[in-house]
């Protein structure tokens, strides 16, 4: 009989939250997440014998290392969650009590009831075998793995470089792409591709500078089947950083619903949408003064192709389109709305 797998659940709200944990601390949180279930229990025990077989390398000092990691949570180390709509913030201590038991090789911790609810009841749950995260050596690789897993069902994610740096908790020096590539992306690629997913990075440039990163995510388990459907949630999950939440996502969904699949070379709206995002992202990276929402809707309506996208990039305009006279200055709110309408062909 094979060794038992331990599955951890890391809710998307926790991944997206702004927090700083060391590699060892992330090990502890993953152990906690693997234990949480829908019950009235708020006390959890980390038993070294339970996790020893999952860790590659020397485990002779596993309790000592486990204790060091847990002790780092003492004091003011906690989790801060912020509601983007209301501006309200909640701060939690990760553990309300820690009980070290060296003779038994165990550490018992208590967590807050509300924190457990957030951990367990988050809408999007990400499942993974604990052995993968326990053997990721870089904290950046850990964070990128959690982030990639949260979008495994979409298969890709498009991010601005500055947003990615913020989410991964990178220092300001990593705004230099060569530093980001060397210290984060190359390491993450090497380590994450040894787990249950493969990732691939596709940089998008503005002129000569990389301004966006597309991450392709593929599960290695071919038996995993995701039910993808074009929805507001899917749109937000892929380009949420470029649009105004559900308001813009609904605009995009409405335009997609009007696409006649019989007249284009795509079998489904998911593939069509993904292709248009690729073309629009490349165009928008060189025309960031234009609203992304307007560009993506125009691209969907007019079925932008690589050839057409390249023509837009080279000329900055295209014959018979309604946005040939838009300049690249700053707009007032009214001018911004008018610009968007021109791009969408409403004027």
Image (tube, rainbow, N blue to C red):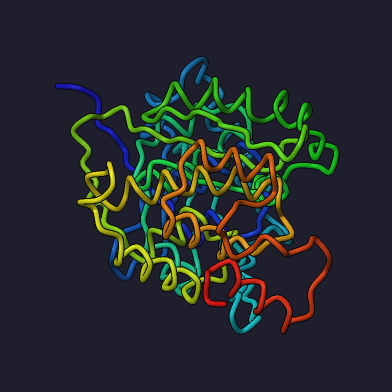
Q: Residue at x 66, y 52 (%)?
A: 317
Q: Quadrant of residue 335?
A: bottom right
The quadrant of the picture occupied by the N terminus is top left
- Seen from the viewer's position, the closer of residues 51 and 210 is 210
222, above or below 246, in the image: above
Relative to 236, 284 lies left or right: right
In-image side of 73 versus 330 (left or right): left
- The quarter of the image holding the C terminus is bottom right
Q: Residue furthest left?
A: 1
Please tell me which residue lies in front, 317 or 156: 317
In the figure, is residue 197 to the left or right of 260?
A: right
**Most foreground residue, 153 or 90:** 153
The spot of residue 220 in percent (x, y) is 31, 27
- In this rendering, the count of numbered labels is 0
Quadrant hosting residue 50: top left
* Residue at point 52%, 56% (across, down): 239
Q: Is residue 245 visible?
A: yes
Residue 102 visible at all: no
Q: Residue at x 26, y 29 (%)?
A: 221
Residue 217 rendering spot, x and y as whole percentages:
42, 35
The furthest residue to the top: 57
Q: Residue 57: x, y in percent?
A: 50, 15
Residue 270 lies, with reference to residue 111, above or below; the image says: above
Residue 186 appears left or right of 346: right
User: Closer to the camera, 320 or 308?
Assistant: 320
From the top left corner, tell me how far across and down residue 210 is, in percent. 72, 36
Residue at the farthest front position:
320
């Amino acid at each position: 009989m094979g060794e038992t797998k331990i599955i951890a659940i890391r809710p998307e709200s926790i991944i997206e939250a702004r927090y700083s944990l060391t590699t060892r601390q992330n090990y502890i949180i993953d152990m906690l997440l693997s234990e949480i279930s829908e019950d009235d229990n708020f006390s959890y025990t980390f038993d070294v014998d339970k996790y020893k077989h999952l860790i590659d390398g020397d485990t002779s000092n596993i309790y000592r290392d486990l204790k060091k990691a847990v002790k780092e949570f003492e004091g003011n180390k906690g989790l801060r969650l912020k509601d983007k709509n209301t501006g309200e913030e909640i701060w939690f201590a990760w553990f309300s009590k820690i009980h070290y038991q060296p003779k038994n090789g165990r550490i018992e911790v208590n967590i807050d009831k509300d924190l457990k609810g957030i951990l367990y009841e988050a809408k999007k749950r990400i499942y993974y075998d604990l052995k993968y995260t326990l053997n990721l050596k870089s904290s950046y690789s850990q964070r990128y793995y959690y982030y990639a897993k949260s979008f495994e069902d979409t298969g890709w994610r498009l991010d601005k470089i500055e947003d990615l740096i913020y989410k991964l908790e990178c220092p300001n020096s990593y705004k230099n792409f060569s530093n980001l590539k060397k210290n984060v992306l190359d390491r993450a690629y090497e380590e994450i591709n040894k787990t249950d997913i493969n990732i691939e990075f596709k940089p998008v440039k503005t002129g000569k500078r990389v301004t966006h990163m597309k991450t392709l995510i593929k599960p290695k388990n071919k038996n995993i089947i995701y039910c993808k459907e074009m929805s507001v949630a899917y749109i937000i999950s892929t380009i949420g950083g470029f649009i105004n939440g559900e308001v813009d996502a609904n605009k995009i969904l409405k335009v997609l619903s009007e696409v006649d699949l019989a007249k284009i070379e795509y079998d489904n709206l998911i593939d069509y949408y993904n292709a248009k995002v690729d073309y629009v992202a490349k165009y928008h990276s060189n025309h960031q003064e234009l609203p992304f929402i307007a560009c993506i809707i125009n691209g969907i309506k007019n079925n932008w192709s690589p050839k057409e996208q390249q023509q837009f990039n080279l000329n900055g305009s295209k014959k018979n389109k309604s946005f040939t006279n838009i300049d690249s200055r700053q707009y007032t709110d009214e001018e911004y709305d008018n610009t968007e309408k021109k791009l969408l062909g409403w004027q």
